[in-house]
Image: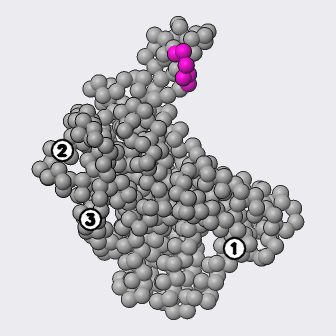
Amino acid sequence: MPTDKQAGSDELDETLRQELAEGASARSGPALEFYGGKWMSALPIGLFIVWAIFQSGLLGIGDTTGLSIGMLVSLTVGMLFVKGDWKEYANTIFEGMTRRVAATAIVAWLWAGMFAQTLQDGGFVDGLVWAAQVVPVSDALLPQLFPAVTFVLAALLATGIGTGYGTTIAFTGLFFPAGLLLGANPVLLFGAILSGAVFGDNLAPVSDTTIVSAVTQDSDIGGVVASRFKYAFVAAALAFTAYIIMGLSMPGIDIGQNSQQLLEAQSNPLGLVHLISMGVVIVTAINGRHIVEAISWGIFTAIAASLALGLASVQDVLVFNAPEGAPFAASLSGLPFVQVVEEGTGVAGSLVTGASGFFPLIVLTLLIVAGAQVMIRGGGFEALQNLLLNSVATNVRRAETTMVLGTASVNAMITINTAAEIAIAPYISRMGEKFNINGYRRANILDANTSALGYIFPWAGGVLVGVTQMEQLAANNGEFAWFTTDMIVNAIDVVPFVFHGWFLVGVFLLAALTGYGREYIPDRESKEVARV
């Protein structure tokens, strides 16, 4: 009889099996022809990247809805260059938007958003602020060290639950405002959160990117994880040191003259009860349960703890604000989650706020995956990979360097890291086998760069979920009324400060050039594992 862990693993295997099958189908389906050749199929993604740089980089507008419009315009312009009937182009857009790999990320965002908001409304930030104040560290030094500590804690959570996206959402909603109250630099703090997410995505055995990298390179997951410690911990040590140095040198934030009053008002040790809620998620995920199930148990635990300790009311969690004239409003008003109001009708509460804040990002994600599908169907992706494979990768050193840079280029275009990994994995396999490079080595190059760059590019999903969470903080008129839009970190500004991501790419680029850690197929055989 299968154990819970085996059952959860089987569910994960089935999910990834379908994602990999979709990736293979995307490469083998009907082709699109463009005026200007295969490279023109990259036009929608290329235009979007230009739009994103113009909007976020040059104008400093961190608006997800604006990016969505940019992708819509880019897809529409791309249609003008399609040869023949535009119907197949339109069908390709639908095909891309319905890919399971996008849905997987979206579901994780929604559940993680509800969980983070439930903890936030349950006073977890107050607990963190209290804990920080009682730590035997000087008031001047505490905000300077906070980003380095946040990096370590985010890395531990991401490794435990196997989702960097979920970690980014939780830590941006919880540790980010706590750090700002203490005076930490917001850009550096956000970079530390993203770095922790990179670490977990790269190293967690239950991470989608870890599993996909191992399976597509014919390697066992345990061997892959064990073989990448020497790379991950070198990058992590450098990143931790960098956060300490930059924390000591970069100015913190001053949230106003009433900062001390805010600290006192938002300091409550009871909020730390939600460490149990986070522990439930970690333990459940480690035991092989689906991430949605793991986070759901965390939500149940957080709601129960908040209600039991008076940290939140039922209406803080979920409330139906019914208009006075509604037929059954008065008779149902006795329910704890129903109230009759004169204005501001609708459904509200932690669960609603946590999920709804990601709706604009969900639209953007679906459109970007559609643009990537157009590039795949149009042959642009294959043309890029064949150029690298046949013209650049002429020896083993150049082959590994090409793997690193090729993975980077794909992640610049496909912002969901698992989707990018699935798309480029066959080419990494072909290139590695051509030069007899071991599967462990190929899997490590593939996963490290995908994990890192998925949290660096300003239009990447990992960055945007964090920005979205900050926007939700700024829209909170209650406990976080002090958090203003000026405190939202621009996605462009954080790019240089995702230290673990940059160091991880650098470590592998150096390893490719010097041969550090290089293994060939005969050097070590992968263990047989169940293939997803």
Q: Residue farthest to the right? A: 84
Distance between the Cα atoms at labels 3 and 1? Answer: 45 Å
Is 294 located above or below residue 479 in the figure?
below
Q: Name the residue under label 1.
A: 380
Residue depicted at 38% across the width and 65% down the height: 497
- Can the viewer see residue 483? yes
The residue carrying pointer 3 sits among few (fewer than 14), some (14 to 19) or many (20 or more) residues within 10 Å by Cα, namely few
Q: Can you tell which quarter of the image residue 150 is in?
A: bottom left
Q: State the residue position of label 3.
A: 249
Q: Give the tally of numbered discs.
A: 3
Mark nearer the viewer, 2 or 3: 3
**Residue receiving disc 2:** 133
Query: Which one is in front, 342 or 336?
Result: 342
Q: Which circle's residue, 3 or 1, is located before the other in the chain?
A: 3
Labels 2 and 1 touching (C-beta < 8 A): no
Part of the protein shown in magenta: 341-346
Which one is in front in this view, the residue at disc 2 or the one at disc 1? 2
Helix, strand or loop for the magenta stretch, by majority: loop
Q: Where is residue 108 in the image (x, y as percent from the top left)?
A: 49, 48
Identify whether 189 is placed above or below 511: above
